[in-house]
Image: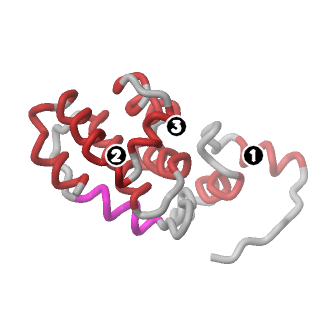
Amino acid sequence: MRFYKVDVDEEVFRCVQKFAVPLVDSFNTALRKALKLGGPQVRGGKNGSDAEAADIRGGLPAGMPEALRQILEVVQLVRKGWRREDASRSVAVSHNVAVQTVNDKYGRQLGLTAAEFEELLGDSERERLEALLKKRFPEYERIIEERLR
């Protein structure tokens, strides 16, 4: 998708600002909401796309804890080449929550800092991440294994 630089006056800026979720939306995504365009909500990191984000959301069972769902979605997007920050932002938008809510899922709820979580996202640390998730969500071991392999 091609992007353009445009100038807007203060009145337009304030109008679009009403549609923005702080720390989630760019001016472009807020404008898309204001104009009811749909389409890309958040641009992913390296080679990230909304189609990739939608693909990873499919197949997770209803009733699954939101914490595990959001963590797995972030993990899978990062493994597809997205930056952790962009993956968290995309997951937040798709679940209609703040980015801090998603960060809390893999931070406070797993007892990790963002840097520690990011370290676990590497291929060499997959088993450690898997063990941590299985300990926290033992009834979802099979899904964790499937999603992290």
Residue 124 as seen in the image, left or right of residue 46: left
Q: Position of residue 40 (x, y in %)?
A: 53, 64
Q: Residue at x 90, y 53 (%)?
A: 9
Amino acid found under the numbered disc labelled 2: Glu
Q: Secondary structure beneath disc 1? A: helix
Q: Which mark is residue 147?
A: none
Label 1 and label 3: CA atoms lie apart by 23 Å
Name the one closer to the observer, 72 or 15: 72
State whether residue 92 is above or below residue 104. Answer: below
User: Which numbered circle lies on residue 125?
Assistant: 2
Residue shown at 56% from the left, 60% from the top: 45
Give residue 143's position: percent from left, percent from top.
15, 48
**Which residue is denoted by mark 1 in the rendering?**
15
- Tell me whether the residue at label 2 lies in contact with that at label 1, contact meaning CB atoms closer than 8 angstroms: no
Q: Position of residue 111 (x, y in %)?
A: 38, 22
How many marks on residues?
Answer: 3
**Which quadrant would residue 120 be assigned to in this image?**
top left
Secondary structure, mark 3, is helix
- Who is closer to the viewer here, 3 or 39? 3
Q: How would you rate the neighbour count of disc 3 (Cα within 10 Å): few for under 14, some for 14-19, many for 20 or more?
A: many
Nearest the viewer among 89 and 148 is 148
Q: Nearer the viewer, mark 2 or mark 3?
A: 2
Q: Amino acid at mark 1?
A: Cys
Magenta span covers which residues?
50-58
Is tag 1's residue or tag 3's residue first in the polypeptide sequence?
Answer: 1
- The rendered magenta stretch, by its main secondary structure, is classed as helix
Against 10, residue 46 (above or below) is below
As measured in the structure, the alpha-carbon distance from the residue carrying label 2 to the one carrying label 1 is 45 Å
Q: Is tag 2's residue or tag 1's residue first in the polypeptide sequence?
A: 1
Q: Residues within 10 Å of mark 2 (few under 14, many from 20)?
A: few
Residue wearing tag 3: 99
Q: Is residue 95 above or below residue 137?
A: below
